[in-house]
């Protein structure tokens, strides 16, 4: 009797072990067999920021969560700041970046591998609320603040020689905004949805200048190591699915309406 009981217990343990292994294998398969590290910015409202309750939220945060859920992959989102996030992906300390990264040829040529675009944005010149500046010509002899390594910086640098202004770079958006508010720079250049949200919700003494903005360009999820192409492929599939089922528009409405 004891032998039969022992045999039964061993059989059950073996079955449970195999079932656990099977479940683990299924989970690993669903997540691509990897725990992905994804870097992002710290303050880029409404795409990534900390809310009043201390939670890290935003369009990028919610899109990534929805895509990962749709595709069944596991990830950790690390809020590092723009420069540090880019550097982490370049160094292989993170697998990908989602931080309102504009898709452009210069980045592609330097090794960035982008997903399909998930949001089209423009870069816009912004001045103090009481400024008389109304055109690019009004910036002659003045300074424009930009955030290093961004599409806004590229836009300003493409115009500075033509309109005779100088450019100063900053590591983050809030410091750049303050430089304009304090009068050290006459204007700054930021992605339009971020700038408008920051002015409205932060009560900043700034205003955007209609007509002084770039052509629209898409944001993309990015990797810098082709070995991580499967992550981009999953992002593209998940993005298409959440657009089709309405989740994507729900996320945009949550933050932009």
Image (cartoon, grey):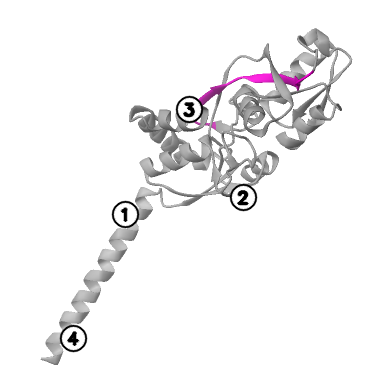
Span shown in magenta: 114-130
Q: Earlier in the sequence, mark 3 or mark 2?
A: 2
Tell me the residue that label 2 is attached to: 93
Residue at 41% in and 31% down: 250
> Which residue is at the front of the view, 225 or 6?
6
Disc 2 packing (10 Å; few <14; some 14–19; many ≥20):
few
Q: Is residue 59 left or right of residue 195?
A: left
Locate residue 166, reporting x and y percent: 85, 20
Mark number, residue 6: 4
Distance, label 3 to label 4, CA atoms, is 57 Å
Residue 198 got which mark?
A: none
Q: Quadrant of the N terminus?
A: bottom left
x and y percent of residue 202 in the render? 66, 33
Taking the magenta stretch, the answer to whether it contains residue 181 is no
| Disc assigned to residue 26 | 1
Q: Which numbered marker is on residue 116?
A: 3
**In the image, residue 125 lies in the stretch drawn in magenta:** yes
| SS at mark 3 in the image | loop
In the image, 204: left or right of 68? right
Q: Residue at x 61, y 43 (%)?
A: 89
Between the residue at mark 4 and the residue at mark 2, the CA separation in whole angstroms equals: 49 Å
Q: Residue furthest right?
A: 141
Question: Regarding mark 2 in the picture, which secondary structure is present there?
Answer: loop
Q: CA distance from mark 2 to mark 1?
A: 26 Å
């Amino acid at each position: 009797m004891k032998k039969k009981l022992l045999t039964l217990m061993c059989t059950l343990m073996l079955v449970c072990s195999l079932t656990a292994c099977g479940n683990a294998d299924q989970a690993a398969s669903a997540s691509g067999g990897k725990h992905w590290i994804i870097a992002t910015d710290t303050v880029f409202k409404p795409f990534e920021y900390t809310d009043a309750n201390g939670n890290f939220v935003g369009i990028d945060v919610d899109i990534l969560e929805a895509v990962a859920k749709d595709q069944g992959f596991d990830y950790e989102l690390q809020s590092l700041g723009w420069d540090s996030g880019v550097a982490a992906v370049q160094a292989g300390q993170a697998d990908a970046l989602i931080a309102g990264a504009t898709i452009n040829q210069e980045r592609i040529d330097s090794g960035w591998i982008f997903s399909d675009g998930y949001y089209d944005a423009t870069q816009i010149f912004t001045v103090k609320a009481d400024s008389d500046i109304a055109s690019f010509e009004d910036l002659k002899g003045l300074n424009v603040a930009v955030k290093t390594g961004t599409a806004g910086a590229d836009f300003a640098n493409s115009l500075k020689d033509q309109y005779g202004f100088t450019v100063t770079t900053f590591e983050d958006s809030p410091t750049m905004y303050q430089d304009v508010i304090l009068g050290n720079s006459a204007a700054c250049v930021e992605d339009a949805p971020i700038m408008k949200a920051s002015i409205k919700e932060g009560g900043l003494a700034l205003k955007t200048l209609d007509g002084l903005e770039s052509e629209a360009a898409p944001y993309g999820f990015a990797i810098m190591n082709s070995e991580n192409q499967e992550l981009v492929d999953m992002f593209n599939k998940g993005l298409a699915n959440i657009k089709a089922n309405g989740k994507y528009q729900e996320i945009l409405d949550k933050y932009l309406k």
